[in-house]
Image (cartoon, rainbow, N blue to C red):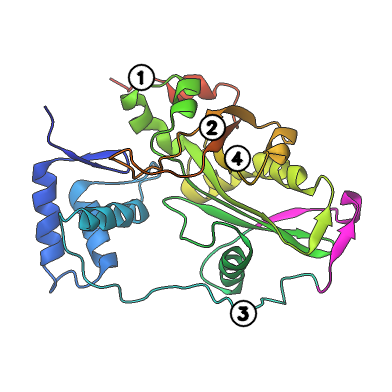
Amino acid sequence: MSTDLHYLGRPFSETEMVAIRAITEDRARYPTRAAISRAVCLALAWRKPDGGLKEVSCRVALLRMQADGHIDLPVPTRVIQPNLNRPAQHLMAPESIDARLCDLQPLRLVPVAGKGSEAAAWRDLIARHHYLGYTPLPGAQIRYLVQSRRGLVALLGFGAAAWKVMPRDQHIGWDRDQRERHLHLVVNNARFLILPHVRVRYLASSVLALACRQLADDWQARYGYRPVLLETFVDKERFQGTSYRAANWIPVGDTKGRGKLDVHRTAHLPVKAVYLYPLSPDYRSVLTAPSPS
């Protein structure tokens, strides 16, 4: 029976854990969490499909290792928090928008890059107005500001897919090995927010449709590969999923309400409907492809 530890779908052998502990304990050479994650990626040859180091995923895995008592990380040198008092008025419409969809056209999805004013505005607005608040998106990611003729109307965030989701996995038909190899080709719509001062019929489904057309190209430009499937989770106590259905997303079932970290099966979280959107007509064959010999 394997004694490997598993984080983010990746097994870590005891030999690898010894190497990780040696890096985290060498504070002279690796004084920060960023330096540690880079060194771990290099030591384990943990890379993205485009060849770059998988540092974001590594940092998440290291944090979970620390929470489980396997390693000890240095205290963070900088913590980014949303500023709930910063209104970002230069990006927001000055007054309520109660209009027809045609009055907002053309809609544009503007990718957020770097750590400038647009990134701060995205973070602050999500923190203030989204029911889940702000948390950093995991892994590879793209955030969008949705601009219109009347100004900023919505925000979107896409990040790494959930490791294990029974309705999604049954729909795809992949096994554990196939999921480990191809999970990076599935992207999670983790945040979607129509700003509260905007009341425009059909706007939400139009924004989702625009994102489905644009994301694969943007993802390839940023990360060097094209995802083939989108996923999202809709809280059934709050929403009916109408906009996703209108944008041709496919409902495939419900979560069990336990959450991804509930290893003891005791949590009681809101049940969420799982929706998928194929970005490629052959997404199933791509995601279930055997490993090359």
Q: Position of residue 130 (x, y in %)?
A: 61, 59
Q: Which one is in front in this view, the residue at disc 3 or the one at disc 1?
A: 3
Find residue 20 and report its image quarter: bottom left
Name the amino acid, label 2.
Val
Q: Which one is in front in this view, the residue at disc 2 or the one at disc 3?
A: 3
Find residue 99 and report its image quarter: bottom right
Q: How many other residues sit within 10 Å of disc 3, few (<14), some (14-19) or many (≥20)?
A: few
Q: Position of residue 1 (x, y in %)?
A: 11, 27
Name the amino acid, label 4.
Lys
At x 59%, y 33%, the residue is 275
Kindly identify which residue carries mark 3. Answer: 86
Element marked by disc 3: loop
Kindly identify which residue carries mark 2. Answer: 228
Kindly identify which residue carries mark 1. Answer: 290
Residue 135 vs 181, above or below: the answer is below
Kindly identify which residue carries mark 4. Answer: 236
Look at the image and give the residue range highlighted in magenta: 94-110
Element marked by disc 4: loop
The answer to if 22 sits in the magenta stretch is: no
Q: Position of residue 238 (x, y in %)?
A: 63, 46
Of labels 3 and 4, earlier in sequence is 3
Of labels 2 and 1, earlier in sequence is 2
Q: Which one is in front in this view, the residue at disc 1 or the one at disc 4?
A: 4
Of labels 2 and 3, earlier in sequence is 3
Of labels 3 and 1, earlier in sequence is 3
Name the amino acid, label 3.
Arg
Kindly give the residue lying farthest to the bottom in the view shown: 85
